[in-house]
């Protein structure tokens, strides 16, 4: 059965102004785990999550910028999987740039694996709109270069916005994809500034994606929301009904 999580970046403003009340609200939503962001920058997070009975199953962090600090934070939090959440879009416009990212991730696999932590990559839309490399879509070229121990977190919304057939992508990479970011909205480019929508109320065709992912972690995320706590709660309810 899929585990339901929430990317805490969704609640970044609320966490900045009142972290304890925000985490208490998250705990009341009935999530199985949470996915914090920038874990190398928040020393207070492990104690606060524990105080509210929350577990961080995965996390986003700049693991290629400061791997030692990220690994220390992941260990303190008990995180099992750390995703590199971003790489400069310009690097995706050339084979050398893509190869550099893959090699950088591969170079960290052993260090993290020794501590029992898996590393992976999280996409946006630009990986799917980047130029092909020798006739191969840029994202697929990237995955072909990765150590087989590097896993994938597919942001289903940005993959769809980038023109990718998401169910086909999930089938192609199977167990390499361990986590999904599940979100909804108008499917406009990431630089449009468009608001996300409560799951099931936007343009995403979510049922085939969820039906194909019973063993993956479903991570709710809003890049932009009008009422984040309310909309997250409604979206978690949508997933629970699945």
Image (tube, grey):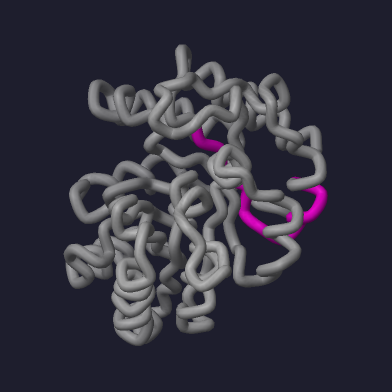
Outermost residue toward the top in this view: 226
How far across and down, in percent of the image, does residue 179 sit?
58, 56
Q: Residue at x 39, y 30 (%)?
A: 191
On the question of residue 116 being in view, the answer is yes
Q: Does the magenta stretch include residue 211?
A: yes
Measuring 44% from the left and 47% from the top, which residue is drawn there? 126
**Bounds of the magenta span?**
210-221
Kindly identify the residue that appears in the image at 67 percent across and 22 percent down: 202
The picture places residue 63, in percent across and down from the top left corner, at 27, 64
In the image, 41: left or right of 107? left
Q: Residue furthest front?
A: 134
Q: Is residue 203 above or below residue 155?
A: above
The residue lying toward the viewer, choosing from 53 and 120, is 120
| Residue 164 drawn at (x, y percent) | 64, 49
Give the answer, above or below, for where 201 lies relative to 163.
Answer: above
User: Where residue 146 sits: x, y (%)?
Assistant: 46, 78
Query: In what quadrant of the picture does the C terminus appear?
Result: top right
Q: In which quarter of the image is the N terminus?
A: bottom right
Q: Going by the image, does 229 lie left or right of 93?
A: right
- Quarter assignment of residue 171: bottom right
Q: In this view, does 63 lie to the left or right of 4?
A: left
Question: Can the viewer see residue 55 in this picture?
Answer: no
Q: 218 or 156, which lies in front?
A: 156
The answer to whether residue 83 is magenta is: no
Q: Is 49 in front, or is 2?
A: 2
Q: Please give the count of numbered marks on the rendered protein.
A: 0
Query: What residue is drawn where x is 59% and y is 51%?
Result: 180
């Amino acid at each position: 059965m899929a585990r339901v999580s929430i990317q805490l970046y969704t609640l970044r403003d609320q966490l900045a102004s009142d972290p304890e009340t925000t985490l208490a609200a998250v705990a009341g939503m009935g999530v199985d785990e949470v996915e914090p962001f920038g874990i190398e920058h928040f020393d207070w997070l492990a104690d606060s999550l524990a105080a509210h009975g929350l577990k961080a199953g995965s996390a986003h962090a700049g693991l290629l910028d400061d791997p030692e600090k990220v690994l220390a934070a992941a260990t303190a939090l008990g995180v099992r999987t750390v995703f590199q959440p971003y790489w400069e879009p310009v690097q995706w416009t050339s084979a050398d740039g893509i190869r550099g990212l893959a090699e950088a991730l591969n170079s960290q696999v052993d260090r993290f694996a020794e501590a029992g932590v898996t590393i992976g990559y999280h996409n946006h839309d630009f990986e799917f709109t980047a130029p092909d490399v020798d006739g191969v879509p840029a994202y697929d070229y990237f995955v072909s270069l990765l150590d087989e121990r590097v896993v994938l977190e597919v942001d289903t919304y940005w993959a769809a916005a980038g023109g990718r057939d998401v169910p086909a992508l999930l089938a192609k990479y199977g167990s390499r994809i361990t986590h999904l970011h599940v979100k909804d909205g108008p499917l406009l480019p990431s630089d449009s500034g468009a608001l996300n929508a409560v799951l099931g109320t936007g343009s995403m065709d979510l049922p085939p994606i969820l039906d194909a992912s019973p063993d993956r972690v479903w991570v709710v995320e809003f890049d932009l929301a009008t009422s984040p706590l309310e909309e997250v709660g409604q979206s978690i309810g949508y997933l629970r009904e699945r």
